[in-house]
Image: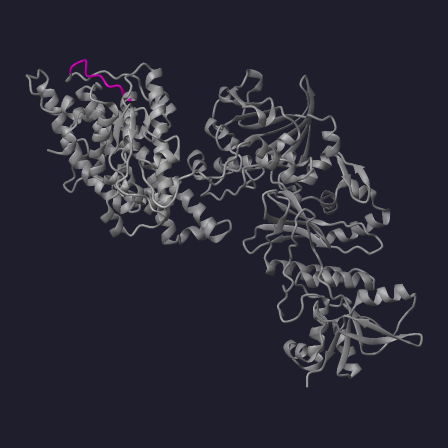
Amino acid sequence: MNRFENTIIWQKTLGKQLEPDIYDKERNLLRTEFEKFRENSKILAAEIANSMPEFTVHDISHIDALWDTANLITGEKYELNPAEAFVLGGAFLIHDLGMGLATFPNGIDAIKKETIWKDTVASELKKKLNRQIDEEDLKSIPEEIEKYATQTFLRINHAKQANKLALISWDGSNGNKLYLLDNVQLRESYGAIIGQIAYSHWWSSSELLEKLPNILGAPGMFPSSWTIDPIKLACILRVADATQIDDRRAPLFLKTVRNLQGESSEHWNFQQKLYQPRLERNRLVFTSKSNFEINEVSSWWLCFDTLKMIDKELKEVDSLLTDTNKPRLQAIGVASIDEPSRLSKLVTVSGWQPIDTRIKVTNVAKLVGNLGGSQLYGENITVPLRELIQNSSDAIRARRIIENEEPEFGTINICFGKDSDGSFIEVEDNGIGMSPKVLSGPFLDFGESFWGTSLMHQEIPQLEYKGFQSTGKYGIGFFSVFMWGKKVSVASKRFESGRDETLILEFNEGLNSRPILRKAKSEEVIKDGGTRVKVWLSSSRTIDKMLEVRKRNLFKISKRELIESLCPSIDCNIVLVNGNKKDRIITANDWISLQPIDFIKRVIGESEYKSLSKAHKAKLEKISSNLEIIKDDKKDIVGRALLYVEERKERLELNGIVTVGGFKTSGLRGLIGIFKGKNIRASRDVGVPVISDDDLIKWANNQSEKLQKLDLDEENQIACASHIRHCGGVTNNFKIAYHKDGALNYAELVDKIKALDTDLIYVVQDAAISNYERDNKCNIEYNDNVIWVEKGFLAIFQSRNVEHFIWWPNVNLHDETKYTGNLSGLVEKALCEVWNCSIEELNNASSLSSDEKSYEGIIGLNGTENVIIDHLDIMKKPK
């Protein structure tokens, strides 16, 4: 006799009865068919270890042990009829079988077609390659990623698969159909409910009432009193499964054979140490066979957390059964679980004390308020608007992919208005919308983004696989809205749902009170799909502050310009709503096709452009034809820009920008335009361009050719040459350095060095020369062997909001990486060319100033006095 057949549940229901049994025939049928059902399931259960070797035991020994555990938690007097025992036992048999590949009749090929498998592969590939993936990447998936995706699918989908297992068939060798539950009548009567109850162990306890039927009647072949209570049986299954964690799940020898590591090893370790629980005063008492030593601390805490989970399940089930007037289980909690120190008297330790030292957040509202507001974003009052538009754009991109919409699909409406509750700002999109689970889950989970999670894979299957990439990554952006005010309303509806499924999440006192989740009123419903966030402003000055810009002085911009400045290259349509009037500000991806001067206005700002002189506007008009759309090797657009250097006297700082997901982040000096970038920190105010070195060099060379056609003075030529050099381009005929005979381009510099016929040349920083002449109010009479040049590195990348400096582009982008990546490097190259030596030979022979050592030399005369400049380089021809 199997051990489970000795349990009181079995003996009272399906076992042979001692006294005359009027239902012996019916009971015998159920018992016989269950034994066949068990033998078939036993084969599949043995296969789980092949798919999930790191998991604790899920074979028939675990399934049989559930009868023991159910017997313990229900108590001797708990009433089940034979039909309920059969259904419960069937759910025991199949609830975990889905973790084995063998339960899928069409095998791994069928699993690879499943969206969760595909999304997991895409997610892991993105992590491995650290970039967006394409179709070529999916043609050769690494073996370890395939294995991980398969195991992830089986783990996530096993309960769903259990829902089918009592009904599906496998093809036999002789063409017949094989079923786990072979009896047709029992399969038709109980197959579906067995599957539902097995599936339910993966649901939350609150979902049991929503998804399971109340009471099912008996089929004609059984007594009418043999009804089925699915909710009662589901409660028994979930707590029995959660509670069965003793050494039968984790044999020490099997752990050793499988050579388990990491968290899997810790799971096995604590379960291997546990005795079976006993019941005392309605509490399960867990005890250990041996102490947890100091090297097993993590395993003990994992045990503690698991027992906490069991305690929670028991309490929730007890509450559900009580509230529905169903028989309560005898076990309603876990003993000594409230204090780690008390549990350590039962699950013992040695050499350490289990004091809960986990980091805690006592005041969650304060933390969210700080990190989601000014402490992270500073006093930039426009951040909430940027974050709301960004969330909307992510939702639109998701819907665009799922519904195969055109690239121009998706509109974000922005309204600045006033109602009976005061002034407000409202942002509404027609994106994918949020389900109740997302709206009450990840949306409110500070620091946990919905995008890229397993929940996203389940809620929006294939989104990851089809290449979706969100701008939002940190799960904190929404909380910035409380920088504006405490009263916030969030309305959302999934695009495929009906209008009456619109939900409203209301914050009336900011983060200091619980938000209210309710159904939308008729006037609040979202007709199509998407999300609407409305924030009432605490300060009457909020909008004015958003429109105030300080550059050389303080001036006010329009709401249109504000929005354009926040997301100049966004791929969504943006409409400014004012009452019944709607003004489209941005058309999706229009930054690519805007007329050159209109594009420049968007980049530098309409107000800035209007403030320019007629001459400067004419100059911009002339140079605007140099604008170039930049594509990568996959023909994707990564930028649109022109190289532009102002005359020093202008001091206008008309900079370009880096955008991430269409949103402005960092500035770029020396060019006007937009480069797509990637964020490097949570506040998303620093984005580094994604353009490759080769594509940047190609753009710089094109710009160099275009600028050659303009009549630029020497100062502007040198400034342009510096920018081109820093971007890896060729300076062509631009002047790059000075000699007493005038400014020289590279070819002229080579000729000059040849003509000097000297073995020693002083290379001086150009600023040192100009500073000396300015301070001494003189013009130096230079010696022949003096060349002055820009020796510094141009800071193209600009970010005023980061504590550390970021070099972009790489200072040695050009092919000849031996030479310094600035104009001084071109002087080095010219010297090497004339003196027929390598840069290494030149540097070894020369005296080069540095932060640690400074050299000085006489570069000329100031009247009759020698002009001595320090921190110069004394370049000597190698012998």
Q: Nearer the viewer, residue 145 or 313?
A: 313
Q: Nearer the viewer, residue 299 or 792?
A: 299
Give above or below for 647 relative to 307.
below
**Colour mode?**
one colour
Magenta segment, prevailing SS (helix, strand or loop): loop
Left of 357 or right of it: where is 658?
A: right
Q: Magenta region: which residues? A: 223-230
Q: Position of residue 34 (x, y in %)?
A: 16, 29
Q: Position of residue 20 (x, y in %)?
A: 5, 16
Q: Nearer the viewer, residue 143 or 483?
A: 483
- In the image, what residue occupies the spot 46% across and 52% down? 128
- In the image, what residue occupies the spot 65% across and 79% down? 841
Quadrant in the picture for residue 844? bottom right
Dividing the image into 4 quarters, which one contains the C terminus?
bottom right
Quadrant in the picture for residue 424? top right
In the picture as drawn, the residue positioned furthest to the right comes out as 863
Q: Position of residue 503 (x, y in %)?
A: 52, 22
Left of 6 or right of it: where is 799?
A: right
The answer to whether residue 94 shows anywhere in this view is yes
